[in-house]
Image: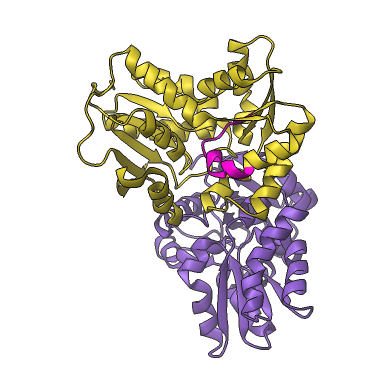
Chain colours: A yellow, B purple
Amino acid sequence: MSAGGVDAPLGVFDSGLGGLTVVRALREILPDERIVYLGDTARVPYGTKGAATVIKYALACARHLVARDVKALVVACNTVSAVAPERLRVELDLPVLGVVEPGARAAVAASGTGRIGVLATAGTIASGAYSRAVAQVSTRAEVIGQAAPLLVPLAEEGWTDGDVPRLVVRRYIEPLAAARVDVVVLGCTHYPLLRGVIEEEARARIGPTVTVIDSARSVAADVMDFLASRGMRRRAPPTGAAVKLLVTDMPRTFRETAARFLGDSVGEVEQIDL
Amino acid sequence: MSAGGVDAPLGVFDSGLGGLTVVRALREILPDERIVYLGDTARVPYGTKGAATVIKYALACARHLVARDVKALVVACNTVSAVAPERLRVELDLPVLGVVEPGARAAVAASGTGRIGVLATAGTIASGAYSRAVAQVSTRAEVIGQAAPLLVPLAEEGWTDGDVPRLVVRRYIEPLAAARVDVVVLGCTHYPLLRGVIEEEARARIGPTVTVIDSARSVAADVMDFLASRGMRRRAPPTGAAVKLLVTDMPRTFRETAARFLGDSVGEVEQIDL
């Protein structure tokens, strides 16, 4: 398999609708690019599952996008980025960009004390991927990881404000506050859907100067740099819908969240079988 | 494919660990039976997914158990029982017992007013299966369904008491209280893991005489009747482990929950690929 040319779309995938936060960030800074997004909604969530299972699912998603002739693959899922990027790079003959490294770099840049909190799925935390990524850019920074498995179902169900998400977020933020972090990384692409509650709880429990890092923005900047360095940026607005959405199951919430997130650029949602 | 003989095990399956509540109920009233339990932990939850996806997963689970020569199949998952029992009966040449009908019968028997509340997954509620099952045994009873999608991740993560499950359960119980039900059916095999909180909230919001129906017990009684009527009950205690546990992914919580639920009868947990 080989990658498509400059005019080919970017392939982006995630377990469910969370990766739409990465698509939105890509649309903001790369409005000329076409995007094919695959949400594996038939098998969401990934983050509570073991590495072998996540790798199997990620390869199926990636192969489907490669068959659609994408020019690069953006893994808009921290769990996959944490356990599978090398497998994807080895098995697929095209560039693979993950979300962990850009988020880790942004966190190191934002931290004054070097104490970096990461909220992520159980799979991402268990992998140690954020600690390794931070160690590559700073010898003095330290990662305090907190698994936050309830946040994905809350985001998928649209329970993004009110008492329940607030209490759940508080329970996950408290250990980070006790560890005196000054940065909190949203280490799962679903979590920006809960950003309001997470920022409020982080300010209240950790302190008003805490920085919350949305890795969706960091990865979009990474993709822009990558495309520019390879001379692979499109230079004209796409005709028709800029974003093609694929799902493996059609949950009630997907279409509405996609429309709210991406506005007019959303075309039809197509259901595929992996 | 054909069913195993009297000495063959019962095959029981669910999306994750929820069906262990059915295994426990079966062990209590049918201690001589051997059981093979399959939890599709690689694809949990089913209840947020569409009917076609659920049917595909259910067929894969059922075929695996049939290949192990079970004498009957117990669908310990309300979502599958709601959307797939006829497909399973047609495709597999063996008896298939679901959880919806026994729960519906128990609810009708327990209700004085005929107003029956059902807490279940979005998939089960959307199917209308409980309304149909209740209509088959009573012309005057009415089902008020409430989708409760957050309860499965809470149970899978072991968040079964404290503020968060209490507030989540309260939000789902309130519409049932407003509809003046006198029975609440736990229409998902995960929910008995949250039984304490659900009973407390139901008593506080609906009234102290509300009846909470655990369909795990109802289905176990149904299985006993079925085996007795066919002369298929084993008449001697099983040698070795009575329960064989299979999972498609190995989540942290499965083994501990299984041990807590089933005690000494649990053998090794085997991971399989579907």
Residue lying at the far top in this picture: please name it: A139
Looking at the picture, tell me which residue is in the foreground, A198 or A151. Answer: A198
Q: Is A109 drawn above or below residue B159 in the view shown?
A: above
The reply, left or right, for residue A47 in relation to residue A28 is: right
Residue for point 43% across, 42% down: A40
Does the magenta portion include A188? yes
Total marks shown come to 0
- Residue A166: x percent and y percent? 67, 48
Tell me which corner region of the image, top left, top right, bottom left or bottom right, holds residue B14: bottom right
The reply, left or right, for residue A205 in relation to residue A225 is: right
- Residue A244: x percent and y percent? 30, 41
Does the magenta portion include A214? no
Tell me which corner region of the image, top left, top right, bottom left or bottom right, holds residue B162: bottom right
**Bounds of the magenta span?**
A184-197
- Residue B23: x percent and y percent? 68, 58
Image quadrant for the C terminus of chain A?
Answer: top left
Q: Is B225 drawn above or below residue B262 in the view shown?
A: below
Looking at the picture, tell me which residue is in the foreground, A124 or A30. Answer: A30
Residue lying at the far left in this picture: please name it: A239
Q: Is A205 drawn above or below residue B78 in the view shown?
A: above
Residue for point 40% across, 65% down: B90
